[in-house]
Amino acid sequence: MSAELFAPEPQSHSAVSLEVPRGDFLGGKEIPQPLSGSATAGYRTGKYTQPEWFSNYHSILEQSGGDCLGAQSIQRVSKTKYQDAEASVLQTQSHGTRLLGERIQDIHYWRSELQRHIEQLQVDITSLLGLKTRLEKALDATETPYAIALDNLNCRTRRPGPDLVKDNVEEELSKEVELIRNVQALLKQTTAQLVAQIKRNKKAKQMLEMDWSDKYQAYNLDDQCGRYSNMSPDTQHHPGTATMDCGLWTKFTQDNISNAFQEEQSTNDLRMLVERVLLDTTDDLRVQCSHVEQAFSQRCMELTGARSQLEMKLATVLEQIGAQERNIVALQQAIHNKEGPLRIAESRLYVRSHRPNMELCMDDPQISLEGEVRQINATVESLQHQLSEARRSLSLLEESRMTLEKDLNCKTHSLFIDREKCMIQRKQYPTVSTLSGY
């Protein structure tokens, strides 16, 4: 401060009034109070002494020095405090920025994990949809062998009576029908499991996509926060916001990924199960088809052999029928041939029975003629008996012929059903790739 503020002219009222409150004494002397009266109010009636003058401005100097020292002390403390505060704020801000960077890295890591599992679940869903299509195609493919087996059984019910037997072919066809029904039930059950797994995969994928979307927004927001600086123009004061516990955040994502991983494992297990089911059912159907075809081939061989034997036996019977017919004709002719000699012998006996008196004796001619008649009658009787036996044999041969022809027709019809209808129809049996759902 300048001395002009503290050494006013004697006529200055303001200087005297400012310094009076410092003390009522100067140099141990009482300052005289102004006399009453408006003209002299606020002014001393006498002058200060020189010691008082020195004492006054020295006091002012001391007071000013003390105030300056106090101000300097406050300035040093303030500088230290705002420097510390600046360093602390910068350190806190730097720490927050670093934590934001680490958080962004965490979000990027979890988002990458979510993206990987989302893509894997999409691949699994596509794969399961493909397997579902294969199962449906395989199920549709079983309708053809099922219809073939039922039609084979139905056709074989029209076999003639003697061949209407429950042979090996019918047993294998019945096994094939039962096998196809079991395969169809298994394929339907596996398809239902596949559909349920696809639904679970889609649900898990939806949860991952929602979490990924949240992570994407959080990543962008934290990236925006990390780019803020003290010179950013778009920052402003905001009230505090509520946040979730970080442990719950991590657990939520980990639970989603764990659930997705479990579904991926279930998908892999189910995929192997479906492949094994398709392979096993296809092998079982083809093996049973082979058994049926082998049974048909064996049965056709048996029918062919039986028919060949019947044909040979029929040829023999027909030959015997012809021979027996010729034999009957010969016997009839032989009997007919005996009528002349018999008439002659009987006529001779009749004529000689008219011999007179003693001439009617049993002479040698008479004895010979009677013997001839008996012989011819015996021969005719024997020939007639033989003719009867020949006719009975011919009747039996005709019955055998009819039986052989009927059985031969039966075998031919059965062979036609098995070989020309059933076996040809079985050529439409689906291939391995078709039964596998391709």
Image (spheres, grey):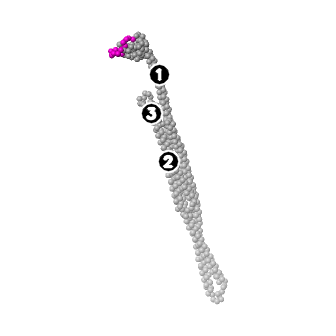
What amino acid type should be assigned to the residue bearing mark 3?
Answer: Gly
User: Distance of mark 1 from mark 2, alpha carbons?
Assistant: 75 Å
Residue range highlighted in magenta: 35-48
Q: Which residue is mark 1?
A: 77
Question: Residue 327 at x, y = what percent?
Answer: 59, 72
- Mark 1 vs mark 2, foreground winner is 1
Question: From this viewpoint, which residue is outermost toward the bottom?
Answer: 357
* Residue 240 disc label: 3
Give the secondary structure at mark 1. Answer: helix
Give the residue displayed 44% in from the left and 28% down from the top. Answer: 229
Query: Closest to the observer: 219 or 181?
Result: 219
Give the secondary structure at mark 3. Answer: loop
Give the residue displayed 38% in from the left and 11% down from the top. Answer: 47
Is 207 displayed left or right of 42 in the figure? right
In primary-sequence order, the first of circles 1 and 2 is 1
Query: Closest to the observer: 236 or 424?
Result: 236
In primary-sequence order, the first of circles 1 and 3 is 1
The local crowd at label 2, few if under 14, some if 14 to 19, many if 20 or more residues have their Cα within 10 Å, is: some
Query: Closest to the observer: 418 or 308?
Result: 418
